[in-house]
Image (cartoon, helix red, strand yellow):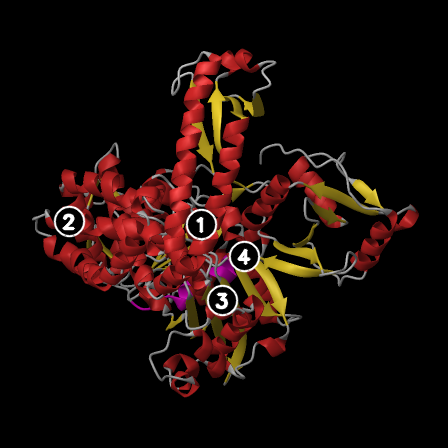
Amino acid sequence: MSQVQPKAQFNLDGIQEQGFLSFFRGLPEKPNTTVRIFDRGDYYTVHGQDALLAARELFKTSSVIKHLGTGSNKVESVVLSKLNFESFIRDLLLVKQYRIEVYKPKSGSKNEWQAEFKASPGNLSQFEELLFGANSDLTLTTGVIAVKVANDNGQRVVGVGYVDVTGRLLTVSEFSDNETFSNLEALLVQLGPQECIIVSGDQSPDGLKLQQVLGRNHLLVTERKRAEFSNKDAAQDLARLLKLKGGADASHVIARPELEKTHAIASLQAVIKYLELLSDESNFSQFTLTSYDLSHYMHLDSAAMKALHVEPQITGTDGGATNKSHSILGLLDKCRTPLGHRMLAQWLRQPLVDLNKIEERQDMVEAIISSVDLRHSLGEEHLRRVPDLQRLARKLSRKQATLQDCYKFYQCVERLPNLCGAIAQYDGPHSTALAAVFTTPIQEMLTDLNKFQEMIETTVDMEMAGQGEFVIKPDFDENLEELRRQMNELESDIEKQLRKSANDLGLEAGKTIKLESNAQLGYFLRVTLKDEKVLRNNRNYRMIDTNKAGVRFRNNAMTDANDQYLNAKEEYSQQQKTVVDEVINIAAGYIECIQNLGSLLATLDCIYALASAAVAAPIPYVRPKVTKTIIAKSFRKDFLEHILDLALKMLNLKYFSKGNSGNPMTLVGRFTGDLYLAAAAARVKVEVVAAAAATAAQVEVVVEVVVVAAVGVGSGILEVFPFPLEVETGCATGTAPAHSFTLLEVDGIDIWGSLELELEIEENINGGVCSL
C-alpha cells in the first residue's frame, strides 16, 4: 500500500466528544475482523482497536494516534481523510477479508449514530464504485455461502446455499459427505466464495472440523443464530426475489425441485437474511435459482489448487500476492474484458469432465489459433471495447445507471454486427461450432435489441456524446431547445474572450494560450508555466490555480459568461431529468438480455485468451487428446510403468508419489498438470510429455472423474491434523468414484519408512498400494 498522509485533527468540542464516547462504549462487542468507521462529513474516524489497526496497517506509524477522553477512559482514535478511507477499506475488504461498518449521525443528532453501510468480502455491492471504479478489472468472486451440517438417518448431509449478488444468482446444493468434508471442500474450490455463514456456537466434532476446512480455504467465517437457518417462509421470500414467468407465485416456487433440498434451502435463507436482500426492492424479480451438481466438474481440493499453482497465492502477513505470471491463471489470462477475466478464473476452478464440452471448447480454441485475422480482429477491434455488462445490469437493477451507461451499451450493440461478420469470415473445419455458440445467438439478441437502439438514437444527443457529454437531444423539448441556444451563444462569447486575451497578452490562440473546460470549473484559459510571467500584476485576469500543466485563469468577461453557462447547463440537466429517468427505466427492461450477452461475450473472450496464450508460448502448445480411458505410451520411468500397468487392473487407480524423489516427482507434477489443463480445455506444452519420450498428442487421459488431492507439509495440512496422512489419505481414496484417477502428492516428508502408515494406506485402497 502506498504511503498516505493522515488528516491533522478532530473537529469536536468537549460536549460532542463526551457524547460520542458515551455512544461508542455502548456499542455491542464485535470480532476483531469487523472494523467500525465513523463518517463525520469532511473526514472519517476509527477508534479503539480499529484505530490501532489503521495506524499499523495504513499509516505504518503510531504517531497518528490521538486520544479522546481523559485518564483511564481514554480511547485511541485516528482521523482518515477521504483518500485514507478509500485506501483503508480496499485493504480491509479485498486483501485482509475483513468486514466493515460505516456509521453516520442520525438526523438531527450529533451523538446518536446508525450503521449506514455494511460490507464484507462476499458482499461488496454498496462499495463497488469506490473499490473498483469505472474501469474495473474485477476478477475475484464476491459470493457468500452458508453451510448447514445435518444428520439424516445416520448419514452426514451437507446443505449449501450460495448467493452471488453481482451475478444475480441463487444456488443450492445438498450432498452426503465424510468426516473431513471432502465434497464440501471441492464445492468451495469450484464456487470460490469469499465468505461463509455457519451456525453460531457449534462445538460438535463436525462443527469444529467444518471450521478447519473453511480456515484452510481462507474464507471469512460469519456465525449466525440457528433460527436463521430455517425453511419458514422460504417459498414466499424466493417468489419475491426470483424472475418468474407471468402469473407465477409462491405456489409455483414450492413445486420447484430445488425446494426439496431442505437443508440447502435453509442455508440459502440464512444468506438472504444476512445480505438483507428482501429489504431492497431493487432485488425483487432479479435472481435465478439453480441447483449445483458437484459431478459436473473435476474434483479438486484447496491443497491441489495450491500445488498446481492455479491462481496467484497470497503470501506473507501483508497480504501480498505472488507474481500473477507464476500461476496457470496468469499464464492463460489474455482476456480483453473484465467479463472474460472473471469467467476464465471460474473455468479454472471448474475444469470440465464432460468429454463433449471439452472438445467443443478445444474446437473453438483451435479455430481462433488457426486464423490470424480472426484472432487480431477479436483482440484489437472488438473485445477490448466491450464494457462490463454484468456491472451495467447491476446498476440498472439498482437504479444507479446513468445516460452514459446506456450510451456505452448502445455502442457495444452497434459493434455486434461487425463482430459477427469477423467470426463468419472463418471458414475452417470448426465454423459450425463458432456459429452455434456465438454468431447465431448474437444475431438473435440483435433482433431483441432493435428497439433499444432506436430509443437511444431518438433521445440521446450523439454529437455531444462524441465529445464526452451525455444529454438528451434539445429538439426533444422546447425548453431544452431554448437552453441549448443560450449555451451555444455563451460558448461563442467565451471563444471570443480567448482571442481577446491572446491579443492582450501577446500570445497565440490555440498554441501558447488555450481554451479548455471540465465538468467542475466549466471554461477557462491555460498557459504554460514558462508563459506565466505575462499574468503577473495584471489585474484584468484572475488565476484559478497552478499545476505542472500550467496556469489556469479567466478574465472578468469570461468569468461572467462561464457562470451563466454553468447555470444553463445545470438547468438543462434538471429539465431533461424526467426524460433521462424514462430512458433508464426502459433500459432496465433489457437487464436479462444484457446479462445473457455479457455471458456470451465473456465466453468468446476466454476462448480468445486460451488461443492467444497458446500462440504466444515460447514452446508450442498442442491440443491434448481426451478419451474415456487412460493410456500413456512410451513412458520410460519404471515406477510410472508399474503405476499405469496397475491402472488397467484396478477400477480405482491410486497413484502415490514421494515428494523428495527428484525427477520422477517433477514428471508426476507435469503429468498431473496436463490432466488438469486438459479438463479445462486448455492446450499443453510439447515438452511436458516429451520428457517421458512421448508426444503430447500421444497422451490420452481420463477426465470422466479426476480427483486430485495434495497431502503434506506443502499443503499446510500437517499444521492441522496430528496424523494427517492417515486421515486425509483415507478421505481422498475413500470418496473417489469408480473409474477415477486419484493423485496423493506427499510433499517434503519421507513417509515410506513407516510400516504402520504403509499398512494404513494399503488398507484404504484395498491392496492397491504402490511403494516407490
Say the numbered circle drawn on residue 572.
1
Mark 3 to mark 1 CA distance (whole Å):
61 Å
Q: Residues within 10 Å of mark 2 (few under 14, many from 20)?
A: many
In the image, residue 733 lies at what x, y percent?
Answer: 40, 64
- Quarter that holds the N terminus: top right
Say the numbered circle drawn on residue 181.
3
Q: Residues within 10 Å of mark 3 (few under 14, many from 20)?
A: many
In the image, residue 99 lies at what x, y percent?
Answer: 61, 55
Whether 272 is among the magenta residues is no
Q: Start and end of the magenta stretch? A: 722-738
Disc 2 marks which residue? 423
Mark 1 to mark 4 CA distance (whole Å):
30 Å
Mark 2 to mark 1 CA distance (whole Å):
43 Å
* N-term mark: 3 or 2: 3
Q: Is residue 208 left or right of residue 375?
A: right
Label 1 sits on a secondary structure element that is helix
